[in-house]
Image (cartoon, helix red, strand yellow):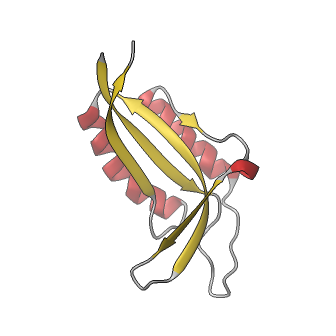
């Protein structure tokens, strides 16, 4: 039994709407850069689904009750050095918000047991 932590990071495929409500696609290079950074930091990352046409749709209300709809690609990372990973993601969330020009980036984590 190996205990670790699983992180799910939901990366947007579009920038937040402009003043006219229009959204632009996020450049593939930004997503590729982020995937490379996760790989380099943790030596493993799963990006799912592969096709942007199969991306997940998320709906959420901000603090002013404005409805947002995001199309996202989740990235999954499994780690055994939990303190290092927690520190990394606490710093990375600020970078991701700026890089993808988002109000929020949704990152979840939980303790998991790896079956061996």
Q: Nearer the viewer, residue 3 or 102?
A: 3
For residue 104, what is the image quadrant? bottom left
Q: Camera-side residue: 26 or 63?
A: 63
Q: Residue furthest top?
A: 116
* Viewer-closest of 39 and 6: 6
For image coordinates 70% across by 69% down, the residue present is 24
Q: Is residue 31 left or right of residue 37?
A: right
- How far from the left and from the top, in percent, is residue 76? 49, 38
Identify which residue is drawn at 50% across, 83% down: 66
Taking the view exactly as shown, the residue that stands out farthest to the left is 83
Quarter of the image containing the N terminus? Answer: top left
Tell me the residue at 70%/63% (across/down). Answer: 25
How many labels were placed on the picture? 0
Please provide percent x and percent y for residue 101: 53, 67
* Rendered residue at 64%/58% (across/down): 13
Q: Is residue 89 left or right of residue 65?
A: left
Residue 64 vs residue 100: left or right? Answer: left
- Residue 111: image location, x then y, percent: 30, 35
**Looking at the image, residue 78 lies above or below residue 114:** below
Q: Position of residue 58 (x, y in %)?
A: 56, 62
For the C terminus, give its image quadrant.
top left
């Amino acid at each position: 039994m190996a205990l670790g932590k699983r992180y799910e990071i939901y990366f947007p495929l579009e920038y937040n709407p402009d003043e006219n409500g229009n959204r632009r696609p996020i450049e593939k290079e930004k997503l590729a850069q982020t995937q490379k950074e996760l790989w380099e930091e943790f030596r493993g990352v799963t990006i799912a689904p592969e096709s942007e046409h199969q991306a997940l749709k998320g709906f959420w209300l901000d603090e002013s009750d404005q409805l947002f709809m995001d199309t996202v690609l989740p990235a999954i990372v499994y780690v055994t050095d939990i303190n290092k990973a927690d520190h990394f993601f606490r710093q990375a969330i600020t970078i991701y918000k700026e890089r993808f020009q988002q109000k929020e980036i949704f990152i979840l984590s939980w303790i998991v047991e790896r079956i061996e």
